[in-house]
Amino acid sequence: MTVSYTLEVADARFAGFSKLLFRWKGSIYKLLYKEFIVFCLLYSAISIVYRCSLNETQQTLFEKTALYCEQFSNFIPMSFVLGFYVTQAFSRWWGQYTSFPLPDNLMMVVSGNVHGVDERGRLLRRTLMRYANLSSVLILRSISTRVRRRFPTLDHIVQAGFMTEKEQKHLDHLYSDFNKYWMPLTWFSNLAAQAREEGRVKDDIALRLLMDELNKYRAKCSMLFHYDWISIPLVYTQVVTVAVYSYFAFCLIGRQFLNPKHKYLGHSLDLYIPVFTLLQFFFYAGWLKVGELIINPFGEDDDDFETNQLIDRNIQVSMLAVDDMHQNLPLLEKDKYWVEKSFPLNSDEALKPAFMGSTYDMRLIGEESSDASIQSPVVNRYLPVNVWPPSKLKRSNKVKLLCFSGKEANAGDEETHCKTPIESDVQFVQEGDGIGQTSAKEQDAKLDTTNVA
């Protein structure tokens, strides 16, 4: 079952993730504890043999071997190999989730375009959606161990109601060397064409819409099949596994605490528990376990996809949409705000000014220029003031960046600076219609006597 903890991390707080560390189901402890115990036992056994069973000459040879392993074990590119592998595995995991065939779009199109409230119309809609769900069951039965346990044979699919006995015989008589998950979708397309001939589907546009949604649904089923068929190259999985296991095999010897009397570099302290080596094993081996977990999410691990639950959900909502809810509308009536024409904003967020864009209060004004593309009666109606901090735009006769402050700004002051929206509201300043035809000197003269509203 998928482990969900979204509610527990809804808000960021002090040590917010710490409570998740004490979970067992779906945890890294459950995945890794066996390998961790084996590593600790092997390390302890080698340490005991080194300390108690070897003579002085043998200890010296062992110490030289340990120093050699410690020196060259870092040549294994653990972080790069593991990081790239897990990244690819996660991309593949998310791609498989987004490729899961959900009938929601298809059932909406069927409910809205296959008409008829009689028994024939109802039969057409239910059969169309049953065929779609049957196709997903057949493909999931081929790739998911959970679904395979639930439907070991086609007889179990018939007993579950996804297929009739006649349809099973028809499917069995159709010979193919390949997976037959696509055959119910072919039945779907033929039945939709038959509904068009009967007038249940009103026009060719509606039929085309049905076919488009059917093809999208079929494409997702096909993508799941290809994800199961084409895996991450085996050689890369082998490289990652060998890199991790060989690295920690060398650590079993190279990370042993040596006799401090021999004064080896970095071995001045003699301990029995290699704390940081165990932490390193937990991180790197755990990283490898993460890749092992998500490379195929259709198994029976704690965090694998709930395929059986999704199958049950899909068939239930499909039949509700095309049968019980077809032309079954609630009574139309005026809503609560029919007269008020607007909805009240009672939330705390509604009291804050709405964000209109970072450059909403900034405007460009065109000055006298030979460039006619920036001249317009609307642009020339606004008075220029200096901008602070200074704009990176070079002063030219083409465009000048404007910003208008509130009541405290004086347009006649050449050093007037724009204030932030917190200090004053940003407003537009308009002059007479003829300002667009006046010269720059006349505009500067008006600026000396005009106050910004």
Image (cartoon, grey):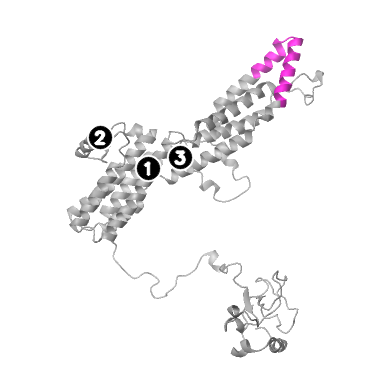
Q: Is residue 57 magenta?
A: yes
Residue 352 figure quarter = bottom right
| Left or right of residue 25: residue 274 | right
Q: Which residue is mark 1?
A: 222
Query: Amino acid type of disc 3?
Result: Thr
Query: Amino acid type of disc 1?
Result: Ser
Q: Is residue 46 above or below residue 404?
A: above
Percent from the top left, x then y, of residue 398? Answer: 66, 77
Name the chief secondary structure element in magenta: helix
Q: Is residue 411 above or below residue 305?
A: below
Q: Regarding mark 1 in the picture, which secondary structure is present there?
A: helix
The residue at 57%/31% (across/down) is 240
Q: Please identify the quadrant where the N terminus is shown.
A: top left
Other-residue count near label 1 (Cα within 10 Å), few / some / many at <14 / 14–19 / ≥20: some
Earlier along the polypeptide chain: callout 2 or callout 3?
3
How far apart in space, not on screen, are marks 2 and 3 (Cα)? Answer: 37 Å
Magenta part of the chain = 44-71
Identify the disc placed on residue 2: 3
Question: Of residues 389 and 352, which is closer to you in this image?
Answer: 389
Other-residue count near label 2 (Cα within 10 Å), few / some / many at <14 / 14–19 / ≥20: few
Q: Which residue is mark 2?
A: 175
The residue at 71%/18% (across/down) is 65
Evaluate if marks 3 and 1 touch, with contact meaning CB atoms under 8 Å apart: no
